[in-house]
Amino acid sequence: METVIIIVFFVGYLAITLEHNLKIDKLIPALAMMAILWALIALTNLPVFEVNTDLRELEPTLLDNILLHHLGKTAEILVFLLGAMTIVEIIDYFNGFATIKGFIKTRSKKKLLWLFAILAFILSAIIDNLTATIVLVTILQKVIKEREVKWWFAGIIIIAANAGGAWSPIGDVTTTMLWIAHKVSAAQLIEHVLVPSIVCMVVPVFVASRFKAFQGNIQDISGEEVEEESKFGSTMLYLGLGAIVFVPFFKTITHLPPYMGMMLSLAVVATFAEIYSNAKFNISNVDSVGEDASHYSPVHHSLSKIELPSILFFLGILLAVAALESLGYLFHFAETLEKTMPMMGTESHGELVSDLVVLILGVASAVIDNVPLVAASIGMFSVPIDDPVWHFIAYSAGTGGSMLIIGSAAGVVAMGMEKIDFFWYLRKIAWLALIGFLAGAASFMLIRNFILNA
């Protein structure tokens, strides 16, 4: 039966990876794989276990208990993401991101390159790398007209956005997973991963700034039609970003799960949105409002634009990986890795963990979705919270996906918005992402070793 379960997982994972070739949304194989795996466990009465991280051993448990446990952990992530997505959509409802375009005053391509990279790095740490890429590529389309020049800029935005999301607990789905799973704390994640992430962003931008594509000035766009701005756009932008940033502080003060803070932030932002829109709308009574409710209510409008396919995909893949964890497969796989892989890392809390394993995970995230990779690593490694291993995993999984345009959500959305050719990106951008990834990884190991030996 173990072989059957591994085959089901492999086939489902392969279907997710080949989403673009099969032309089947990845949520479908993720949900099917989740349901089939748990059905096989239930029908064959396979023993399930809970990992005791303190004793580093598996403890038998009941199927209902372990399934409810994993569902609860997954729901924490999904509710958190729903809140964050809704706040971002409310900001967009008021055209708040148009405020960012006002920061662009220069016509120099080299200065624009640094400006877009810095904006991507900062924004992705707050509103996540996917949303930051959408916002900046939208602005890019209004600033630059030459197709290949836009591709160059978009490539750098992808690298910078993924680097920016890696050091923030709210900047990437994978870092959020590690944070909610109590593998990293916000302060320690920022302290250990911020500098490597900056290096990962700065090195490719510095190299690219010398390319011909970033020499000279862009065309004068002053005569172009000015986009209409909402009078509350700037207010909602700063309120929304501030509300999202508030979440880690709320968790630190109250010790409540992050989704609680996100729901409070959503309530505050939604209140101001309703006041500013003068909408007479009761969110608990949608049907009575009529067909035009979404036109008048920013909350209803924003909820209707939430990307539910992504939420369902996360549900499927996280519970599918949880099935393997409950059977003890990930625990035993981690033990095998520790015995067979060359140990290049430092000793941490009595356990040697290979840097090579984490680097391979980062490279693999360019080909395979990083969400299940990180989900698997959470079930594999038994090191305590804020162990350098978790910080290195956050960095590697967050930035490694930049090496292929299909390797991250930011890359996929930029590819769709600008119709960027896969092989063009492979030739022109992939090596820049690789040197940034390796430079950041080297800086992480130097900083880690310096801190541990101090």
Image (cartoon, rainbow, N blue to C red):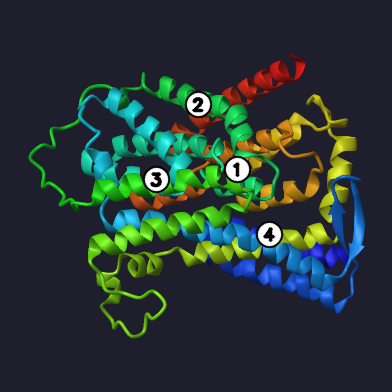
Nearer-N-terminus badge (3/4): 4
**Residue that extends furthest to the bottom in the rendered view of this protein:** 288
Can residue 86 be seen from the camera position used here? no
To which residue does mark 2 refer? 198
Q: In terms of depth relative to the viewer, which is nearer, 18 or 274?
A: 274
Nearer-N-terminus badge (3/2): 2
Q: Residues within 10 Å of mark 3 (few under 14, many from 20)?
A: some
Q: In terms of depth relative to the viewer, which is nearer, 371 or 214?
A: 371
Q: In terms of depth relative to the viewer, which is nearer, 181 or 260?
A: 260
Q: Position of residue 220 (x, y in %)?
A: 13, 33
| Alpha carbon distance from label 3 to label 1 | 18 Å
- Type of amino acid at the residue the image marks with label 2: Ile
- Type of amino acid at the residue the image marks with label 3: Leu
Residue 377 falls left or right of residue 403: right
Q: Which mark is residue 241?
A: 3
To which residue does mark 4 refer? 73
| Alpha carbon distance from label 1 to label 2 | 25 Å
Query: Element under label 1?
Result: helix
Q: Residues within 10 Å of mark 4 (few under 14, many from 20)?
A: some
